[in-house]
Amino acid sequence: MNRRTFVIRTVAAAGALGIGWSLLPPRGRLGDRDTLPAKPGEAALNGWVRIGTDNHVTVIMSKSEMGQGIHTTLAMLLADELDADWSQVRTEMSPQRAIYNNIATVVDGLPFHPDDDGLIRRTAEWMTAKVIRDSGLMLTGGSSSTKDLWLPMRQAGASARAMLVRAAADAWQVPAADITVAKGVVQHASGRRATFGELIAAAALLPVPGDAPLKTAAQFQLIGTPMRRIENATKLAGTATFGIDVALPGMRYASVVMCPTLGGTVQSFDAGAATAMPGVLHVVQVDGYHGGTAGVAVVADTPWHAMMAVNAVKVTWNHGAMADLSSAQEIDRLAKVLDTADGHAYYSHGDVDMALQSAATRIEAEYRAPYLAHAAMEPINCTVQFANGRATVWASTQVPGLARRAAARALGISDGDVDVQVQFLGGGFGRRLVVDFVGQAAAIAKVANGAPVQVIWSREQDLRHDFYRPACVARFTAGIDDAGRLLAWRNTSAGQALLPPILRRLFDLPGIPLDKTTSEGAFDQAYEYPAARIAHETVPLPVPVGFWRAVGHSHQAFFTESFIDEVAHMARQDPVAFRLALLTKHPRHARVLQRVAALSGWGTPMEPLSDGSRTGRGVALHSSFGSVVAQVAEVRVDAAHVLHVTRVVCVIDCGFPVNPNMIRQQVEGGIVFGLSAALHGEITIEKGQVQQGNFNDYQAVRMAGTPVIEVEIIPSTEHPEGVGEPPLPPIAPAVANAIFAATNQRLRPLPLRLARIESTA
Amino acid sequence: MIAITLNGATVSINAAPDTPLLWVLRGELHLHGTKFGCGIGSCGACTVHLDGVPVRACVTPLSAVGARVVTTIEGLHGPEADRLVAAWTHVDVVQCGYCQPGQLMSACALLRATPQPNDAEIDRAMSGNLCRCGAYSRIRAAIHRAAVPAPSAD
Ligand code: FES
Ligand code: FES
């Protein structure tokens, strides 16, 4: 299938997602005062803001807050255009309406190279945006939130401001042009003034302007400044409500045990002992939902009673199709596939075979990445009440629309009979894009006679029934000439695709032929290869896989940025200079790389250590989700062969930096999250069963292992781009390249484990 | 019925003596500031104080509390706690926030025992508290800031 056919099918598929969603005529995303439910003492001016007679400005959040600081950023966008005072502003989760659907992430998912600016790409993006606006999903992911709402939130603020000004102009009988607004006060040159609260009743009766002028960058008061997180106080007091903190009158608690073998089912179970235990109310078998695994749940009066009793249920499992699956064998199989498979070329340029033949030196390497779990701090949980044919779901989810559908299907009711209340997420990282646990919780709540039930997974269930970052194997061949110039680049990777099973589960869509997530991070980078072929071979495997922070970029960046480092060393060139020579038409990338080199002291010797430690610096450059990030990592390998990552310098160009403080937080956090994966992250499967169960055997970086992190944000006036994921991909290759610089060991499988006995080469 | 002293009050609890303190707090008393993260003492999300000493509530049976005073995030007060919350806010430590009550409990116990901790002391005291969002460098900066009795005005 060629790209054009694929694009058209994608758009048709996007249209098919619309089933069950109200189709609005294509128009702006402003909404009107009826978009939001009424609240006493407050009035809505559009779908994004309510103002109270007490002067509170409530900004409506259509994105889930999972640590990325999006509530702060979105509130800034609207409050700035509204000219509200920051102390007036508070946030509230939105209901589910078409205006809140995420357009940016779906458009970003189209498989185009970033340099492709052709008509097909522009048409496909426009059509997709149009379809998704009306038929898509509320979704927080793909580092898309700021990008998605940069204009809609500002337009909503500007429109609301215009209504307040109009109301004041009418009341004072003066021209609107003579009225100013600052810090929540509307004022006329004559000295007359009114607060938002005094004007809201009249303003709310006016027509909603769709074309209120937006501020120029020079007029921003909040946007572009380092604002602190808006929900700090409740999170520090322990009063912020995460999904697991939802408390309802008469609530029951459920604990589940799923088949230890992925995809297994329940043959039979003996609930006798469990039923006799204190507080136990129901013992119920549950199916696997949305790719999850079946199991047995115990509903009890307290969480501890449920947890104790679930251990007492004697289950006989059908271990199913994955009973013999071993991840080590599967990864070997991926490598074997690459002996013969050519893959689908996501990027192809020039005659690679000829260029490789003419090369003075050819370099080959194979890289591997394991399965990974998300392991967010808040274990998977979900609360559902099902009474009188209607359900309410309280969940930490990135996809309230899909959660609604999952609950509706599990309960046999229509989507419209389910209300989803999104809570704070104790981390998402992509795990909460899957709604297996929502379907499961709904099915459990069905037996509770109308009582709300909170299902809490143990950490072991959370780690053993995740939707894992797919394992992947990549092979490279590069050719260089006598002068050490790159002539050709060939890269084929093999692994599971993410999208086909998800689309099938959710929308009954047949498999789509291409999945950009498999090759992103490999095919879409800026390097100007004289000749290149970058391909991915999709290998269907039964392991449940999902979106893991930075998705394909998370491992493809490791492969590509490690291998380019190998080629640079083989070409006897400086790794920074070698990359820069391939970026002559990409000044944005070149600048980020040059800045990180300058800030890190690249090229200057590292301080010698007297204790026998060896030190080294490594660099990596990667673009994802619209942003460009470069990192230099410094490592020390001590005399006992223990690796320490001591310092990471990071430069990011993410377009206009809307909230530099949250950007820095995400850079720091993305580096630590990526470092955990690079140094420790590995999920292994034996006999279909995930071997790791808790933080003692699925390790993560802790305080002592955290490097000094220095961050620079490139000033920019371009459209804001993604931030939550882009800082992650470069850290693994930067560290691997630093290890090579320190030890001459080229580590090609993740996680990075130093060999005990080293060659002295 | 087992009576414990919790956040300055005596509370009678109707739970089996082997119930972990975490689930007594969350399940019986509906004090949700103390978080569940792992259940095996490996993440620190459930950190509370027993007579001022940080312990993991998920592996502390109710029967082991005895006469010791239990303090949770809801009852964490005093000059060190105030300085820590101010520093956490100033440095803007929090991301998802789920680990943060536990981090504050550990940090507060550290500052009470070691008013001016160095980096190695911070590493040691905070090693049991996982943060999957990776807020560690800000946690470290905030502890240093809170350790100064009179924070500078910036
Ligand atoms: S929940 Fe107690 S240490 Fe993790
Ligand atoms: S702030 Fe999210 S786990 Fe620490």
Image (spheres, rainbow, N blue to C red):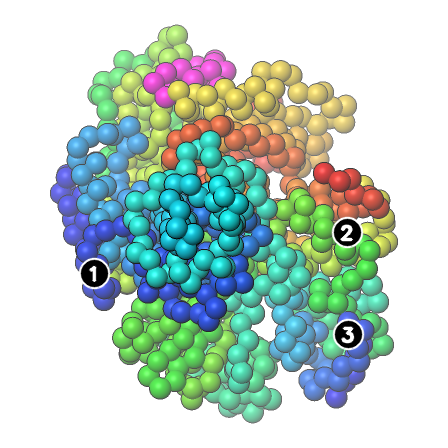
Q: Nearer the viewer, residue A328 or A72?
A: A72
Q: Position of residue A44 (x, y in %)?
A: 40, 61
At label 3, the amino acid type is Leu
Whether residue A211 is visible = yes
Check contact, mark 2 vs mark 3: CB within 8 A. no
Q: How many marks?
A: 3
* Residue that label 2 marks: B83
Specify the quadrant that holds the N terminus of chain A.
top left
* Residue that label 1 marks: A23
Q: Provide the chain ID for the residue under circle 1.
A: A
Q: CA distance from mark 1 to mark 2?
A: 53 Å
Pointers 1 and 3 within a single chain: no
Compared across the picture, whether A472 is left or right of A8 comes to right
Residue that appears at 55% across and 80% down: A306
At label 2, the amino acid type is Arg
Which of discs 1 and 3 lies nearer the camera? The answer is 1
Q: Is disc 1 placed on a helix, strand or loop? A: loop
Tell me the tag on residue A109: none
Q: Is disc 3 placed on a helix, strand or loop? A: strand
Compared across the picture, whether A273 is left or right of A212 comes to right
* Residue that label 3 marks: B6
Q: What segment carries the magenta color?
A: A568-586
At label 1, the amino acid type is Leu
Q: Is disc 2 placed on a helix, strand or loop? A: helix
The image shows residue A54, relative to residue B96, as above or below, that is: below
Compared across the picture, whether A670 is left or right of A232 comes to left
